[in-house]
Image: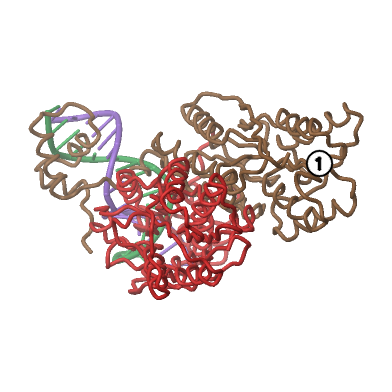
Chain colours: A red, B brown, C purple, D green
DNA sequence: GTGAAAGCGCTAACAA
DNA sequence: TTGTTAGCGCTTTCAC
């Protein structure tokens, strides 16, 4: 177990001062070619790598960005976090994971931990509300599909347009009894625009909108049970607009247990359109969010904030993906 | 933009020395209750939070563990990384993402970056070979379903048993022309035991094993094309054992374009059995890896290594999940 | 062009 | 029981 070489070792081996070695390392100030070569040779010989922690302490920045999302184990968030990580990498930042599991306490703890780690910025998309930490810090934060406070810019897809496209698709297919699922509206979220569009569109056609609450963080079995309840309460249902693709999938499964088959008896449209979902369940008609654009936009906004610019929220367009379920 | 309080500020406000404040912070040494209270009061008033970077510099440890995997945007790796992150969190470690995208150069760069960040340990599951960095460091490393070097402990599921179960299932279903997909065997990997079991089992039944190479990191369209070639080369095919669930899915899609329908004309069995996959494609018969146990095992081994113990590799049991595709 | 010295925020010998 | 001091590895101002 050899201790890694430090700058002092390099300097000694090269026969210069620590300062000179540092300047070579950082291409700063006047240096003779001879000195540069000597130092480089010493670095190579000792296999020198700068200690980032020491540098961070001095510079007061870490090159670390925290990613606070419910979980990475979900097609939408996995694709999003992968894209965020990639975009951050390109800009020289590393991503620290913060899976809040939609637990407010865990999210608050996580936030503190990440702040303690002196992260340079934060990208959040967790669904909790009233997390104090976000307000008491002045760290650059960008949120994705979530309203944290009116100080924090939001990157969202065009949820209203998505809700409109989805509802219209079901109406065009001849559905008369369309039901919507969404999570409980206990806090403001861009997501609710999907529901607003659904309701507007239904009323415009003289139909009554009905929305069932399916909390995001429940086990699948509970979700399935709640979805089954829809069929018990409304046997006349002939269309369902789910607020995400997994709920759309569960709906199709639930429907089958009532002898209703998709798309013959029931049309179903989902939301998100992650690549994995489309691969595993290509039949699903869904509204696709521009996941990787959302990621690059969020990272770009964060970088601008880090550079001291003020930035505003961004809305990106969605697309309807035609499968056979609606 | 107020600068956060440092220990010195706390000490001054409490009217003690920096050292005393540090001792209160770390519950170290003898302290009078009065001093403790004074310091705590000052900390509370200043909203003091220790600077982890400074601490890291002194302690020479960061509480950071690097996760080097091909991508988090894949059901198996997403579930694995989420479980790893959770287990690490419980032990007080934070996870830094390193999505290598199965690019050896990127993996090597990532490794260096993570090492520069003075991570305490590394959990790797990327599929590249000959990454120098793993050999030249003496950082504790645990690998998952991958052989890095014989110094590095491997956590794997029982791949041979999985291959056996899968092949036997197809044989039991009456298949006579079973083909296997796997990625090219250009480097040693526990994964190949799946293939070995398939070949052994086929030969035992007097059948000829045939394996097609489907590299892991190609775009879906290329994979689909390669899988279609199987049907062109072997129209007699009546069973396929895929080395992962997405290839199983692609096989079913490809088969349909040849007028072969699963399971009537062709039985298909996959591998991995991630929760997301099962949710989105519940019909798939597959071999399920014990993903979360693999994660906790890997983390436990890493912690033991960090505590200076030597650890050995671990193999965990797999399970056949019955769907309707085989 | 290069070196000496101070300091980033924290911890831990050692002394008092 | 508490304070003084040095040092973790690096960067940078200032002097030469």
As displayed, is residue B220 above or below residue B285?
below
Residue at figure coordinates x 22%, y 49% from the top left: B6
Q: Is residue A35 visible?
A: no
- Residues B105 and B292: in front is B292
The chain to which mark 1 is attached is B
The residue carrying pointer 1 sits among few (fewer than 14), some (14 to 19) or many (20 or more) residues within 10 Å by Cα, namely many
Q: Is residue B93 visible?
A: yes
User: Is the N terminus of chain B in the top left, top right, bottom left or bottom right quadrant?
Assistant: bottom left
Q: Where residue B293 sits: x, y (%)?
A: 54, 31
Q: Where residue A273 sits: x, y (%)?
A: 55, 61
What is the total number of numbered labels drawn onto the structure image?
1
B53 relative to B7 in the view: left or right: right
- Residues B160 and A215: in front is A215
Residue at figure coordinates x 81%, y 41% from the top left: B239
- Residues A15 and A163: in front is A163
Q: Where residue A246 sits: x, y (%)?
A: 51, 52
User: Is the C terminus of chain B in the top left, top right, bottom left or bottom right quadrant?
Assistant: top right
Q: Where residue A314 sits: x, y (%)?
A: 41, 73
When asked about the image quadrant of residue A211, the answer is: bottom left
- Residues B97 and A19: in front is B97
Helix, strand or loop at label 1? It is: strand
Label 1, on which residue? B239
B11 relative to B317 in the view: left or right: left
């Amino acid at each position: 177990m050899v201790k890694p070489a430090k700058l002092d070792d390099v300097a000694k081996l090269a026969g210069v001062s620590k300062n000179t070695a540092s300047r070579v390392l950082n291409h700063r100030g006047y240096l003779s070619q001879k000195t540069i070569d000597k130092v480089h040779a010493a670095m190579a010989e000792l296999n020198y790598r700068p200690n980032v922690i020491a540098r961070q302490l001095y510079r007061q920045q870490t090159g670390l960005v925290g990613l606070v999302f419910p979980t990475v184990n979900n097609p939408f968030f996995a694709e999003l976090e992968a894209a965020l990580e990639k975009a951050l990498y390109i800009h020289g930042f590393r991503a620290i994971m913060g899976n809040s599991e939609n637990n407010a306490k865990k999210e608050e703890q996580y936030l503190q931990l990440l702040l303690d780690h002196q992260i340079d910025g934060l990208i959040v998309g967790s669904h909790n509300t009233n997390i104090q930490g976000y307000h008491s810090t002045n760290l650059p934060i960008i949120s994705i599909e979530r309203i944290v406070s009116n100080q924090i810019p939001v990157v969202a897809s065009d949820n209203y347009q998505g809700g409109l496209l989805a509802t219209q698709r079901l109406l065009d297919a001849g559905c008369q009894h369309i039901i919507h699922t969404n999570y409980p509206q206990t806090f403001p979220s861009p997501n609710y625009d999907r529901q607003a569009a659904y309701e507007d569109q239904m009323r415009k056609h003289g139909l009554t909108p009905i929305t069932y609450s399916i909390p995001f963080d429940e086990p699948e079995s509970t979700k399935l049970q709640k979805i089954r309840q829809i069929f018990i309460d409304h046997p006349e249902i002939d269309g369902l607009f789910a607020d995400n693709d997994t709920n759309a999938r569960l709906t199709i499964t639930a429907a089958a247990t009532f002898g209703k088959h998709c798309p013959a008896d029931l049309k179903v449209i989902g939301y998100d359109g992650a690549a994995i979902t489309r691969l595993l369940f290509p039949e699903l008609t869904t509204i696709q969010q521009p996941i990787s654009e959302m990621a690059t936009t969020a990272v770009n906004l964060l970088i601008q904030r880090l550079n001291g610019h003020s930035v505003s929220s961004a809305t990106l367009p969605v697309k309807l993906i035609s499968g056979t379920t609606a």
